[in-house]
Image (cartoon, rainbow, N blue to C red):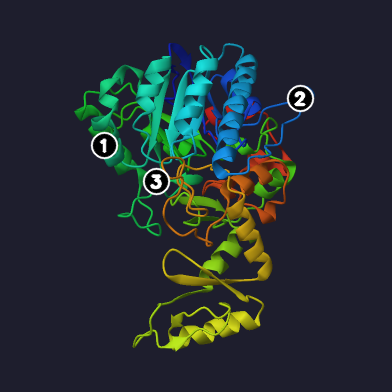
Amino acid sequence: MFKGLKPIQYAGREVWPLIEGGKGVAATNHASSGAWAAAGGIGTISAVNADSYDADDQAIPQIFLGRTREERHEELIQYGIIGAVAQIRRAYDIAGGKGAININVLWEMGGAQRILHGVLEQTKGMVQGVTCGAGMPYKLSEIAAQYEVFYLPIISSARAFRALWKRAYHKVPQWLAAVVYEDPWLAGGHNGLSNAEDPRAPEDPYPRVKALREVMRAEGLADDVPIIMAGGVWYLRDWESWIDNTELGQIAFQFGTRPLLTQESPIPQGWKDALTHIPDEGVLLHKFSPTGFYSSAVINPFLEELQARSERQISFAKQASEAFSVSLDVGVKGKNYWVMPADLMKARQWHAHGFTDALKTPDDSLIFVTPQSRDAIRKDQKDCMGCLSHCGFSSWKDHDSYSTGRLADPRSFCIQKTLQDIVHGGPIDENLMFAGHSAYLFGKDPFYSNGFVPTVKQLVERILSGD
C-alpha cells in the first residue's frame, strides 16, 4: 500500500480515494465502472449517449428517424435515459455491493436535466453520486437532493466553485460529496480553461487546488469533504506530498486515461493498440469542439485536418476598403467578397491544390475545403440531432427557438457522430480520440510491457502500490 493512502468515507461506505473518470459517449460503461467499484474504488459510468442493449446483448445503434432536429433531439434524450439506466443496472450487479458507483453527465449536453431526472427516477439505491462539468451546473445540487444522491461538481478553478456555491450549492451542502478539480492543461476531453488563462502556459495545479480548499473552508465546508485531483494523475508516488497535507485537506485522485487500457474497457482494440504508441507531445489542447470549450485529444489525421482547415482561412469584408481592396475570384461562385491582396494569392493557391470551395464562418472569414469535405460538413450539419445544449457546428440550441442565432461554423465538427463512431469500432485515424496529456506514459510504463493489458482489479492494485 502506498505511503499515507487511506480509505475514505463516501456515501456511507468505506472506499479507496481512487475515482474512475467518467469518459463520455460509451467510453466508460458498466463493465469498467462495475469492476472499478468491485475493486473498492468509485466507478463512474458515462451517462452521455450511453449504450443500451437488445435481447442478444448487442449494443443498439443510435439511429435517428425524426424529420426535424427537434424530433431527433427527443429521440436522443430517450436513447440517453434508456442507455444510462441499462449501464447502471449492469454496473450495480458487477460491483456486488463493493465500492461505489457514480454517473457522469456534461451540463452542456442536450437535454442534460431531463436525462438526469429520467435516469435517477429509475435507479434509486444504485447510484451514489453524480459528477458533472462542461459548463456551470448550478442546478446539479437541486436535482441530486431531489433523488437523495450526492453531487460532485467538476470545476477548474476556485472562482468557478465559489460562483456555484453562492448561486445554488449553499442551499443543500449536505449532499455535496466532493469537488472535482479537473486541471485544464492536463485532463483529457473538454476542459474548463477560461478566457483569462493561456492554453500555452500551464499552471501548477497545487496553488490552484490550495486556493480551492481556502474557498471551501471560507464557506464552512470541512476538510474531510475531498477535493478530487483530476488530470495528469498516473503514479500516486508523484503526488505523495499531496497526501495528508494540511494545506489541501482530504485529497482523492481521479484516473481517466489509464482505465482506457484495461480488459474491461469498452473501447475497441484499435484504440487500445494506438494508446501504447502516443509520443510525448501527442495530445493537443485545441478549440475545435462545437461546445466552444477547449478540449484535449490525440493528434491524428482527424485532428490534423481540423487544424489545416482553420489554417486555410482568410478574412473578408462585404464592402471594399483600403485594406480589403480586391474581389475574391475563387471558391465563392460569383458572390461578392472583398479580401486583402495577399489573401487573394493564398486563396488562389489553395484552389489550385483542390480546395475549391470557400465556406463562411461566424467570424467574417472563409475557409477553403475540397468538394468532398464541403459535402460531408453540410450533411453532418443537416443531420444534427441536438446532442449539445448549444452547438457551434450546427447552430442548434436545445430550447427557445432551437437556434443559437449564429452562423454554423464549418471549422468544427459533429461531436456526437465521431465519438459514437470511434467507440464502436470506427477508424481511429478518421475520428476524434480523447485522451489526457499523460497518455504517452502507456508506452513508457513497464506495467504495460510486452503488450500487457491489465484487468481493472490489477490496475487498481498497481495504482495502490504507488505505480
423 in relation to 4, above or below:
below
What amino acid does circle 3 point to? Gly
User: Closer to the camera: disc 2 or disc 3?
Assistant: 2
Q: Are marks 1 and 3 in contact (CB under 8 Å)?
A: no
Which is more toward the observer, 305 or 370?
Answer: 370
Rendered location of residue 325, percent (x, y): 40, 88
Rendered location of residue 214, percent (x, y): 23, 33
Which residue is drawn at the image coordinates 58% and 78% (left, top)?
333
What amino acid does circle 1 point to? Ala
The secondary element bearing badge 3 is classed as: loop
Q: Identify the mark at residue 57; answer none if there is no mark.
A: 2
235 in relation to 130, above or below:
below
Q: Real-space Cα distance between discs 1 and 3?
A: 14 Å
Q: Identify the mark at residue 192; answer none if there is no mark.
A: 3
Which residue is identified by label 1? 163
Q: Residue furthest right?
A: 56
Q: Report which quarter residue 11 is drawn in.
A: top left
Which residue is drawn at the image coordinates 50% and 43% (left, top)?
388
